[in-house]
Amino acid sequence: MRPPKPVIGFYPKFIVKKYLQQLQSIMRKFSIFLFLCLFYTFSSLAQNPLRVSIKGIVQDTSSDVLAGATVMLLQPKDSALVNFSRANDKGIFEFRNVKNAHYILKISYVGYIPYQQLISPSVKEIVDLGTIGIKPISKELLEVVVKTARAPLTIKGDTIEYDARSFKVPQGSTVEDLLRRLPGMEVDAQGNIKAQGKDIKKVLVDGKAFFGDDPKAATKNLGAETISKVQVFNDKSEQAKLTGVDDGKKEKAINLELKDEYKKGAFGKITAAVGTDSRTALRGNYNRFNKKEQFSILGYGNNINETGVNWSDYGEFKGNNTFNQNDNGDFGFGGGGRYYYSNGDGITNNFDGRGFTKNGGGGVNYNFDNKKTKLSTSYFYNQTRLTLDQYQSKKTFLQDNSFTTIDTTNQSNFRGNHSIGTRFEQMVDSSNTVIAKVNLRFSTNTIATKEAERNFSEANALRTATELNNSSDVSSFNLTSNIIYRHKFKKKGRTFAFSTGYNVNNSDGTENLNSTSKFLNAGTVADQIRALGQLNNNANRQNLLKGSALFMEPLSKKIYWESFYNFSTDNREVGRDAFNAKLANQRMDSLSTYYKNNISYNRFGTSMRYSHSGVNVTLGLAALRIDLDGKLYPRKDAQLISSISRNYNEVTPYIGADIELKSNTYLSFNYNLNIDAPQIADLQPVINNNNPFYLSTGNPDLSPEKSHSLGTYFYKFDPATFLNINLWADYSYYLSQVVYNQTVDPTTFVTRTRPENLSGGRRFSSGLYTGFPIIKTKLTVNVNSSLNVSSNPTYINGVLNQNNTQNYEFRLGFSLTPSEKLIISANGRLGFGIIKYTISEAQNQHIRNNSLDASVKWNFAKKTFLETNLDYTNYRNDRFDFNQDIPIFNCSVRRLFLKENKLEVRLAAFDIFNKRQSIVQQGYQNTVSNLTALTLARYFMLSLTYNMKGHVDKLKKNQGWE
Amino acid sequence: MKNSIIIIALFALSFQTYAQQNEGIIHFTRTTYWTKLNGTLSYLSKQEKEKQAYMFGGKDDWKEYTLLFFNEKESRYTHSEEQSEESEGYSWRKEEYNIRRNFEKNTMNDAVEMLGKVYLIEDSLQVPNWKILNDIKDVAGHICMKAMIQDTVKNQKIIAWFAQDIPVSAGPERLYGLPGLILALDINDGAVTVEASRIESKKLTTELDLPKKQKGKKINDAAYQEMLRKFIQEKIKEERNPFWIIRY
């Protein structure tokens, strides 16, 4: 029987000699124990009592009894606690009737070195240990223990481990300087190291050789502050390692364990793909990090309609700056807005399904975080070149008439953006925090549009036809900046926050409008053809200054009082010079404009909240004032023509309730009165004639939109059956809504729109989502249904038209995971829309979009996966005689190769039936439209992805947060 | 001469601590580090865990406050009314969680809400399988010794730090049975930490009394553990985090 390995922790003085003496004495004791153990192992063959009593007296070195000392009996093999007791006021302890076995007796007392002693099975029924003297911890060591809460040195087997943080060295010291301070360690002038008198042949860093075999390479070059632990151990000789035969020769070696923050890492991946029809894609990212810093590079280029990266890659790029808390400085009802949010920065894919795009982008990101200071900065450039061909047919209803517009558009569009962002957060101290953010964006956008538009009468006779050839070139500059300061007062719950921001939005551009229109009903030949050649020079300037303050005061444990103030002043300058290209580029005064607008916004709000055990109810009231100030000039630097000045004062109530009930039930309700200032473009009193058949003019007399909104939400989760139910309903009613009233010429169908305020618009939406397992962990079902009802009024040729729409949607889905290697899901969706127009009741529309999709993920062989999905959608509108089936079938096989599955090879087929196109059916105001756009259809692609960290070689049941 | 100063200093210190605080209230801060907690889930790949740490490390902590009422015979551990900074004055409903231990009668009487139901766990106190380790550290002004226990149901390695100078076997969460009062816990390398921030020595009045009427389903500890085990197993199989629903 091998004697138990002692686990000894002790705390030496910083005197090498004494430390070595102690070590020797322990070794001596240990050999006595060894002997005793062996002895008792033999002697226990004789009849020993089954149960014994163990007793003794605890004293300190000056023979004072230590009353109340903790005495423990541990099992030698794993230090398991068997029994414990306390020394009485005479220092006597006793364990009665314990099993006669091997024990470690451990005595601890505050200010004393924990004492350990091995006890072996006894031949007698009473084991009297006599007087046990325990030693006080030296004063300096006690300080180390109490202050750093760490033991500076421990012994595990034949390894001595020093806690580097307990040995203070001056800043900038090397590991060599640190070693000089460790008890038992010697370093000579040349840097040669000895531990317990023996030469150190090898220095490892985190268990790995550091730049070859020279032990000085690490100790002379590494900074002491990077080290958390120094371990001295006996290593097998190189010979022994090579042959695998332990020759008994031991060499002293040192292992330096790095602190976590100096643990560096890197990850990254690169994907290259080629496909049929010269489809290609390349994307890659590389990240390096340590505990404080993160650095990343991301780049992509493709012609497969990926205008950006996915959210997962975006998260890796932005690292710990992806989600930020407390970034909203626009305080209002319902707290300071402490939520995480992320916006994708325009780097994420936002392709809308129409057309063909070529995309490219790349950037760098750097984050620094040492808990107190957080700094993130990034630069990104991205561009997209879009080629779009689309066909739209739109039917417009008038009071006793209707007409159809057929539009064929070919557009090419180039967008390029440079963006630079910086975020800085400083925790000044535990009660003050400052966040500063600056984002800059430079963009260019070039659009060329060729459009053919034809208007047909109700009897399907061609009335007008126009060919447009427009182009525009805009470059813009955008700055947003924001500083938020938060202060926590000594009184718990009392907080103050202040924010200020400055935004700039400038754009300069030219527009080239060319069109030829034929009016087939016109009386005279001169009226039959109209040609337009116009050049617009646009210059828009906006700067916005804003500030917000928030104060929160706990009135009692359950009542909070919250007040906020918002201020902003928004200055805009819009300039357009229109020139007639057909008349020697003469300025067209009627289509030119220059105006300046200022909107100031002031809001003060206050609320009371009751907050107690899951019930949070807020009642609030805000007073706001909007001042609109507009000045109109014929051109820049000219005499003022007219000016408008308006102000609106409103009082808006707020009610909010969040209630968390027993058994996982949650309820919320809120009511708001919303006031929104009119869009500045709608106030612009100038004609937009980009399309000669659809002319819009602004209205300087607009007043703000005003609406009541109500929302409720109910959630319940039953953990026993895993059933969850979500129910919600939202309603809003417009007291004043900005709508685009129309005047339509009954013969030419030229439409003029003008924004005006109207009341009576309504919206109601409601939904239900529920999901539960039919067979736990195997088969889940979910039901999702929603209802949207809205009523939107507009005046058409002076007659009020109510556009009432009802949209119903019902989804049913199943997800089946029969094994770890197979995941099947199937979903069905029925969508039904009814659109009614009070102006022309016979024209009510019924739009249907039904779909069925099924997907299979199958890990059918080792490291090999098949993924396939079929999405079958039917678009239908009987009145249009429109009935289109779009079956999209994708299939791919991928296999993982190399060590740690670093390489993934994937062969994918997209849209195998070659049917993909984009279809949008919708009805609004007095129209119903149907849009079809071409987009990327069938292609096959082979892609290779190399991931430094390897790919996951199993199927994921849930996408999780990705 | 120098030695005698040390001895005097030590005496002063031992007197200070000798005034044993065997009755009072301990204020604990319980912090959950979600990325570390998720890091203990077996179904997440190494890549996913590293990515979570990369994106959320350093801002994944969630603080709660708890109280332990104790004397030499009994203890009760429950939520504190105190709200964390993160709550911004919003109050969330706290699940029923009252852990009662009677060391004299050797009984537990816990009211624990789990999966929407309150369970009354009534059982005798079994001797927990603590291992005593060598390190010592200071928690809230008390020098504590290190002990370790394995929770095989929740698959947790729990490190407890117990005060040498408070001879009470009570502790936070459902832990007990050490020679001194447990002042700090570290579950699975810092996924959840519970640490005493303040120790209030005072005479307790009714804090330890059993409520007259307790609503809930009575079960024994083994049945409760079995229920936990089954639930965790099911959720892990579904690849969902069971500790979004139950206490870690």
Image (spheres, rainbow, N blue to C red):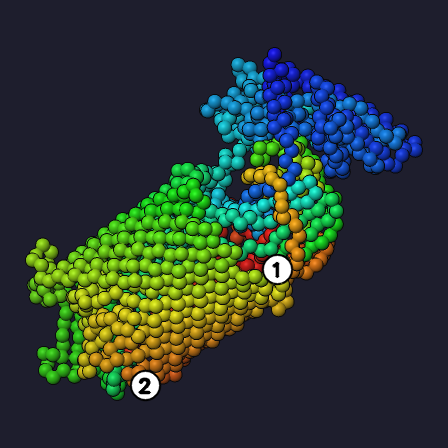
Position of A532 compared to A141: left or right? left
In this rendered view, identify the residue nearer to me: A588 or B120: B120
> Residue at horizontal 27%, vertical 76%?
A794
Identify the disc placed on residue B115.
1
**B197 or A748: nearer the viewer:** B197
Q: What is the tally of numbered marks visible in this picture?
A: 2
Q: Which mark is residue A375?
A: none
- Quarter location, residue A723: bottom right
Q: Quadrant of residue B31?
A: top right
Whether residue A529 appears in this view of the structure is yes
Say which residue appears at 56% left-offset and 20% top-offset: A181
The picture places residue A453, in percent across and down from the top left corner, at: 24, 75
**Lateral position of residue A628 relative to residue B138, left or right:** left
Is disc 2 on the same chain as disc 1?
Answer: no
Left or right of B32 on screen, residue A505: left
Q: Amino acid at mark 2?
A: Glu
Q: Position of residue A924 (x, y in %)?
A: 32, 75
The amino acid at mark 1 is: Leu
Q: In the rendered structure, the residue with mark 2 lies on which chain?
A: A
| Quarter of the rendering containing residue B237 | bottom right
Res A886 visible: no
Where is A809 relative to A155, above or below? below
Q: Residue tagged by mark 2?
A: A841
Dot 2: element:
helix
Residue at the spot 82% in from the left edge and 35% down from the top edge: A96
Compare residues A259 and A476 and report the one nearer the observer: A259
Q: Position of residue A780 (x, y in %)?
A: 58, 67
Q: Nearer the viewer, residue A791 or A379?
A: A791
Q: Nearer the viewer, mark 1 or mark 2?
A: 1
Q: Which quadrant is the N terminus of chain B positioned in?
A: top right
